[in-house]
Image: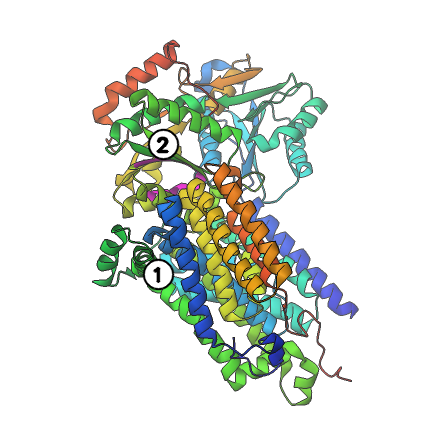
Amino acid sequence: MRRVTSLFAVMAAASMALAACGGGSSDSTSTASSGGASSAAAGGGEKIKVGLAYDIGGRGDKSFNDSAAAGLDKAKADLGVEFKELSATQGETDADKEARLKLLAQGGYNPVIAVGFLYGGSMKKVAAAFPNTQFAIVDSVVEGAPNVTGLTFAEHEGSYLVGVAAALKSKSGNVGYIGGCLIPLLQKFEAGFVAGAKSVKADIKIQVKYLSNPPDCKGFNDPASGTETANGMYDAGADVIFAAAGGSGTGVFQSAKAKTKLAIGVDSDQYESAAADLKPVVMTSMLKRVDVAVFEYIKAAQAGSPLTGVQVFDLKKDGVGYSASGGQVDDIKAQLEDAKGKIVAGSVKVPDKP
Amino acid sequence: MATSTITEPPAADAPSGRPRVNPWLRAGSLILGILLVLSVTRVLSDAQDITSSGTAGAALRLAVPIMLAGLAGLWSERAGIVNIGLEGMMVLGTWCAAYGSLQFGPWAGLIAGILGGALGGLVHAVATVTFGVDHIVSGVALNLLGPGVARFLSSLIFTGTEGGGVTQSPQVAQPPSFTVPGLASGLRSLEDERIFFVSDAAGVLGGLVTGLSWATVISLLLIPLSIYVLWRTRFGLRLRSCGENPWAAESLGVNVYLYKYLGVIISGGLAGLGGAFLSLVASNYYREAQTGGRGFIGLAAMIFGNWRPGGLALGAGLFGFTDALQLRQGETSVHALFLALAIGLALYGIWGLSRARRVAGIASLVIAAGSLALYLFTDTVPQQFTTATPYVTTLLVLALASQRLQMPAADGLIYRKGTAK
């Protein structure tokens, strides 16, 4: 019997190792070449070492993390910074996150950037232990930690613009919003979208659905549910749907294609990432420029005047916006730019709560 | 099911001397009754979506993966091995199906999904049958292993491909689907007439024959096939005997280890097919965590169905239907469900009283009144609750209707050859 138990222990250990492998394989140390190119760039500031901790998914997730990675790559190309990136694994604890941030801080990486609000708790602890290191967290604000910068976005402002676009493009006067999970962050998207659509047509019908409830936010990875929800909304008369649902968005695009209706993507320009047969239904995308935020933060740190406190990347800073690839919003560009101008000028205040 | 041969005392099917009803007749009248209640509800509440063709189609697509997971659990547990690792096997199925479809086309994808899941089943069988590991422990290990392996393979194979990455595959080809010609359009126009009951029946039937994937048809055929193999063949009898009393089976010369292996591997294959359905039919790519706990729901459907194929299909159908309702027009449809519940329970209560089952009858009437009050005094159901509808419904029906659950007698026990007393 003991042999059996030990055999099983080996098997369990192997499974853990494999599971860890899955997450960890994207961990890689990438050191920028310190060749001539970098010294020519970046206005002569001292070269810095940037540590970046990804959320689950890591580099290559075709979403949020990839956007952060793009900012990091741009910083490497334009500013010649060195960096180390580490990735989170599925189902890890706060202690794992803490260890990851500590590893970066101890390795002399300064600033250390964490992607995703899940790092909030662990970052607060690590930041207190390393008072001389600058930290930044994307999508969250850490209270009571002077050396942590919150990099947040005015998602409601970008959503307002795609709401305007949806209302202008809708022939039936009926549009939809699908959120991945009923959390305040996504309610910001909803509030902006609704306000934007109503600014065009006060009596427009707006269908709203969230695919899941916290803490089990599986609605970001459930394309099957995305398809069925979109089917339901299109059947009930909607002809444009804004899908703020991560990986479930592809399901919404599929439904739009089957029903020959339109959809709006989120975070990145999803017209670019969609398969060829789905491109025609992606009318526009609400852009959330995590890459801009990461790059701007690194640039300021490189120049010796790091951004501190809470940094809101809004329309004015190009932190959010809409995409025009595919040319489907070219005919309403004037109205969209007009709405954008009003928000930037402050004459239109977009609500951030529904 | 009246198809049981051994291991099932007849009293379980026909308590208190009631005459045995033909199960097909019973299932048919149950479905007709539900449809009748729903069409009354539709007319009274004006929630048009509850019997629409869109809802019926969505219910079917949402039910099939759960049904396959439930069937997977059935094959394993009928052989006496608890399979809580269904979720992990489904994950392997989603990944392998996407890879197979990418490389060799959608049909190969389905087969790859089955093989991927079967491989997971093989691991579970080696651990539980050969090494006598506790079934739950091995199952949990598989649930950890599945996503880990999928992630690892994704980073090896999907990273750098067009649209693929560590968390998802590129978009892949789907198996073909078809619409029954003539029938679908006729039912469609009948549905639009909004006639009481006729349009409802037309809507439900129309949804089931429109845009039907061949993979769905194959999956549905696995239910009668499982009934036949498990209850009508010598192979099935031996496999079930390993789940009821492996020592007795051994004494009669059955190779228990072999049958347990086969049961668990078939189980893995079915779970893999369920995963393949998710990544190839319900969507068109592999996405990390796409199974979303459906393996566990399938296990619940199997218990709901009292370890019988017909019952678990009913459970999966109930889950798929309520899930479709809440996803499509949740706030109005789930609200209308309260009315349906009130009508259904009131009828049940009156029937109960007429049969002198006073307690059950009165309880039903009281719940019906409460449900009716909820319907009348609210306009819609908030989002936070609609999402939970399929889970709550399944739980309620499980709690109320499944009082005589009978799992295989040796289910979950560790069997060692030659330990019969």
Q: Residues within 10 Å of mark 1 (few under 14, many from 20)?
A: many
The residue under label 1 is which amino acid type? Answer: Pro
Q: Is residue A270 left or right of residue B319?
A: left
The answer for which chain carries disc 1 is B
Q: Position of residue A211 (x, y in %)?
A: 47, 41
Q: Position of residue A249 (x, y in %)?
A: 40, 41
Residue lying at the far bottom in this picture: please name it.
B252
Which segment did they paint magenta?
A240-253
Q: Position of residue B294 (x, y in %)?
A: 52, 55
The answer for which chain carries disc 2 is A
Q: Is residue A345 left or right of residue B243?
A: left
Disc on res. A206 = 2
Specify whether residue A142 is in view.
yes
Residue B88 against residue B131 in the figure, above or below:
above
As measured in the structure, the alpha-carbon distance from the residue carrying label 2 to the one carrying label 1 is: 37 Å
Q: Position of residue B88 (x, y in %)?
A: 56, 57
Q: Which residue is mark 1?
A: B106
Please name whichever residue, B378 or B191, is drawn nearer the observer in this view of the structure.
B378
